[in-house]
Image (tube, helix red, strand yellow):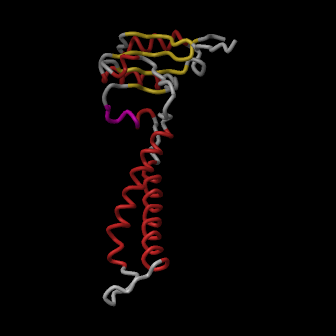
Amino acid sequence: MSNTKYILGSFADPDDMMHGIDKLQANNISIYDCFTPMPIHGIEAKLGVKPSRLPIAAFCFGALGTVLGFSLLYYTMAHDWPMNIGGKPSLPLPNFVPVTFEVTILLCALGMVATFFLRNHLFPGRAPRVMDLRASDDRFVIAIDAQENTDHALIDSLLKEAGAVEVKYNERKYVSYE
C-alpha cells in the first residue's frame, strides 16, 4: 500500500481550477476538497456540498434565549418577588420584550460561535491541517484522496491538461510513540 494520502493539483487561475474539477468529475474521480484564497461562486454546487445546517442551530439557540429570557423575567417579577407599584400588574408583558429580545440575540450569537468552532474543530490546542501553504495566498488547490482513486497517472495527466502549475503527492506521516 502506498504512503500517498492526497494528490494536490495547484492552479494559478480559478477558471483553470474549475476546468480541472470538470475534467476529474467527467472521469469519475472523486474530489476530497478544494482550497482557495478567495470565495468562488458556484464551486459548492459543482462539488456537491450540502447546504449548511447552521441556520437550524441559530433558530434553536434563539428559541432557547427567548425561553430563558422570558422565564427569568417571569420568575423575578411575578413569582419570586411580585411588587405592586402604582397598581400596575406584576406581569407586564410589553415590558418584557426588550430584555427577552436582548437575551435571544445574546444566546443566539454565543451559540453560533460555539457551534462553528466545535463543528470546524477550531478549539485551542489543535494543530491546523494545512494541505498547501500557498492555498491561502495565491494558489487554487484541488485535493484528491489517493487511497480512494488508485490511477495516479491518470489523475496527474488530467490535472496537468486542465492547467495545473504543480501536482504534489502528500505522504502519510506516521507518529511513533516510543
**Residue at image point 40% right, 20% down:** 141
Q: Nearer the viewer, residue 61 or 83?
A: 83
Residue extending farthest to the right is 178
The dominant secondary structure in magenta is loop
Residue extending farthest to the bottom is 87
Q: Give the answer, above or below, for where 29 lies relative to 167.
A: below
In-image side of 172 versus 105 (left or right): right
**Residue at image point 57% right, 19% down:** 149
Does 178 appear in magenta? no
Q: Position of residue 130 (x, y in %)?
A: 45, 21
Pick the quarter of the image with the C terminus. Answer: top right
Q: Position of residue 13 (x, y in %)?
A: 29, 19
Pick the quarter of the image with the N terminus. Answer: top right
**Residue at image point 46% right, 19% down:** 131
**Tally of numbered discs:** 0
Q: Nearer the viewer, residue 74 or 171?
A: 74
Q: Position of residue 2 (x, y in %)?
A: 62, 10
Q: Position of residue 113 (x, y in %)?
A: 42, 45
In-image side of 148 versus 75 (left or right): right
Q: Give the answer, above or below, for where 109 lies relative to 79.
A: above
- In which quarter of the view is residue 46 placed? top left
Tell me where the magenta segment starts and ends, as one range. 39-44
**Residue at image point 46% right, 36% down:** 48
Q: Nearer the viewer, residue 13 or 162?
A: 13
